[in-house]
Amino acid sequence: MNPESEGRTFVGGLVCVLAPAERSAGWPGPPVGEEAQRLRSGLGAELRQLREAAGLSTRLLAARTGVSRRMVRDLEGGARRPRVETLRRLAGALAPNSAERVFGKLVDLAGESVRPDTARSLRQRRRAARRAQRLAGGRRAV
């Protein structure tokens, strides 16, 4: 039996099961190279500047928006492609009085790296927002 024919390969004496090509074809992976640098210097720098101007830590911003602290750090560092709803929530927490203007600027800075929202991601964001609202003591988080 040939392990290569069943999606397995030997690496350093270990058998590794490879993911089917069709499963990973739709996900381009994390941003690398020029795209990561563009996200870090554009979107990431703007998010960090807005967060610091608002006097928020990454933890507090994450709690107010219902995204993870890791997501905030990765977006600031150019290690993730943002979703539209994530940018909308971040804009609302960072600049409540001018959220739409800030949201437009964040989307422009992210450019083609913005990932579309899916039904699943929207359900997850709603759930996280409800959780953040409960943690904030019933006050509206975003």
Image (cartoon, grey):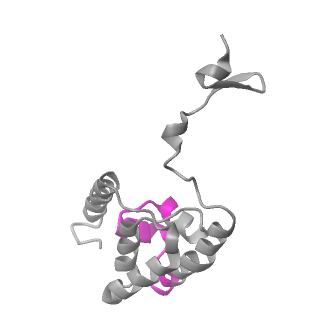
What are the residue bounds of the magenta stretch? 50-71
Compared with 105, 34 (above or below) is: above
- How far across and how far down the image is residue 34, in percent? 68, 69
User: Which residue is pictured at 29% across the width and 62% down the height?
Assistant: 129
Question: Is 48 in front, or is 117?
Answer: 117
In the displayed structure, does residue 110 sit left or right of residue 132? right
What residue occupies the far top of the structure in this picture?
A: 1
**Quadrant placement of the N terminus:** top right
- How far across and how far down the image is residue 71, in percent? 49, 62
Q: Quadrant of residue 133?
A: bottom left
User: Which residue is pictured at 67% across the width and 15% down the height?
Assistant: 2
In the displayed structure, does residue 129 sit left or right of residue 28? left
- Dominant secondary-structure state across the stretch colored magenta: helix
- How far across and how far down the image is residue 103, in percent? 39, 80
User: Which residue is pictured at 52% across the width and 79% down the height?
Assistant: 109
Question: Is 55 covered by the magenta stretch?
Answer: yes
Question: Is 118 covered by the magenta stretch?
Answer: no
Q: Quadrant of residue 130?
A: bottom left
Question: Is 142 in front, or is 38?
Answer: 38
What residue occupies the far left of the structure in this picture?
A: 138
- How far across and how far down the image is residue 20, in percent? 54, 33
User: Which residue is pictured at 78% across the width and 27% down the height?
Assistant: 12
